[in-house]
Image (cartoon, helix red, strand yellow):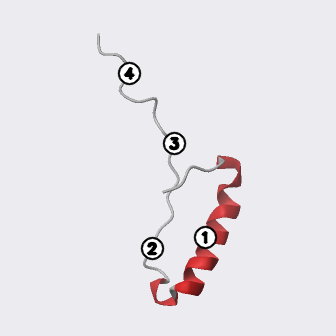
């Protein structure tokens, strides 16, 4: 998990994929990259 600039997600995904597969070539097709947004949390209960 990492906090990243969403505008750089594509470049980060490509870099991570390349480096990960260089280190673990047997994992090709067995991993995934997911982008999500954080929520503001639970907030105040009324």
Q: Is residue 43 above or below residue 12?
A: above
- Is 3 left, or right, of 10 in this rendering? left
Query: What residue is pinned by disc 3?
Result: 37
- Residue name at image x 66 percent, y 62 percent: 12
* Quarter assignment of residue 43: top left
Binning the other alpha carbons within 10 Å of mark 4 as few (below 14), some (14 to 19) or many (20 upward) gives: few
- Which mark is on residue 16? 1
In-image side of 17 versus 29 (left or right): right
Q: Secondary structure at mark 3?
A: loop
| Residue in the image at 30% along x and 15% along y | 45
Q: Residues within 10 Å of mark 1 (few under 14, many from 20)?
A: few
Q: Which label sits in the foreground, 4 or 3?
A: 4
User: Residue 16's x, y, as percent?
Assistant: 61, 70
Where residue 21 appears, as percent x and y from the top left, is 56, 83
Q: Is residue 28 above or below residue 31?
A: below
Closer to the eye: label 2 or 1? 1
User: Circle 2 sits on which residue?
Assistant: 31
The reply to whether the C-beta atoms of the residues labelled 2 and 3 are less than 8 Å apart is no
Observer-nearest residue: 44 or 35? 44
User: Mark 2 and mark 3: span between their CA atoms?
Assistant: 20 Å
Q: Which residue is mark 4?
A: 43
Nearest to viewer (mark 1 / mark 3): 1
Label 4: which secondary element: loop
Question: Disc 4 versus disc 1: distance between alpha carbons?
Answer: 34 Å
């Amino acid at each position: 998990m990492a906090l990243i600039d969403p505008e750089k997600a594509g470049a980060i995904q490509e870099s991570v994929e390349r480096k990960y597969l260089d280190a673990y070539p047997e994992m090709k097709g067995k991993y995934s990259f997911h982008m999500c947004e954080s929520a503001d949390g639970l907030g105040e209960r009324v």
